[in-house]
Amino acid sequence: MREIVHMQAGQCGNQIGAKFWEVISDEHDIDPSGTYHGDSDLQLERINVYYNEATGGKYVPRAVLVDLEPGTMDSVRSGPFGQVFRPDNFVFGENLNVKIHMYLKQADKIEIKGRNQKSSFPLDHNGVRVKKAFVLNVCTSYYT
């Protein structure tokens, strides 16, 4: 099964990403606290594409939220599904390029089960969904 790390950057990317997580959570019957309420075996079987199971049966989005200023992040956290994210999902402010590099270095080790190919990272940036993105320093290079 695929595992996807969702990246959202900038104000627009984070606003679209916040709505994305509302829709995905609704489709998987996950409430704003991260608790699964569905009754479908298929739904539960595929929940690990976008979520990691945390302690207490809670599901946490596999996501990186990036911005230079904390204002957008505060807005996402105070939104309907803001509490479902772990605090270390948010990357902003000073030394942003180092934080992103370290996160991607760890995330780059995620492999699809049964295969030797690396996962892709969907990125929402300025309202554009990018198929694959590699973040270098504070610049983004896009590969479609």
Image (spheres, rainbow, N blue to C red):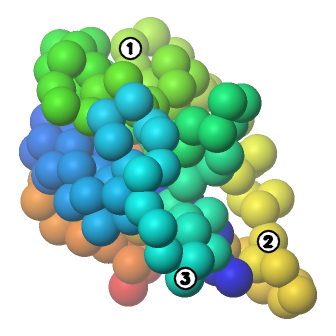
Residue 69 horizontal side relative to residue 138, left or right: left
User: In terms of secondary structure, where does tag 3 sit?
Assistant: helix
The picture quadrant where one finds residue 70 is: top left
Residue in view at x 58 percent, y 77 percent: 41
Which x, y percent locates residue 33? Answer: 39, 30
Eye-nearest disc, 1 or 2: 2
Eye-nearest disc, 1 or 3: 3
| Numbered-mark total | 3
Residue in view at x 61 percent, y 27 percent: 98
Q: As rendered, which of 58 and 3 lies closer to the eye?
A: 58
Q: As rendered, which of 143 and 11 lies closer to the eye?
A: 11
Residue under pointer 3: 42
Which x, y percent locates residue 126? Answer: 14, 53
Marks 1 and 2, how far apart at CA: 29 Å
Q: Which callout, 1 or 2, points at the residue further toward the start of the chain? A: 1
Using the image, determine if residue 35 lies above or below residue 132: above
Marks 3 and 2, how far apart at CA: 22 Å
Using the image, determine if residue 125 lies above or below residue 100: below
- Could one spot residue 41 in this view of the protein? yes
Label 1 neighbour load within 10 Å: few <14, some 14-19, many 20+? few
Residue under pointer 2: 111
Quick one: quadrant of the C terminus? bottom left
Q: As rendered, which of 103 and 137 lies closer to the eye?
A: 103
Eye-nearest disc, 3 or 2: 3
Q: Which callout, 1 or 3, points at the residue further toward the start of the chain? A: 3
Which x, y percent locates residue 32? Answer: 31, 35
User: In terms of secondary structure, where does tag 2 sit?
Assistant: loop
Residue under pointer 1: 93
Label 2 neighbour load within 10 Å: few <14, some 14-19, many 20+? some
Q: As rendered, which of 66 and 79 lies closer to the eye?
A: 79
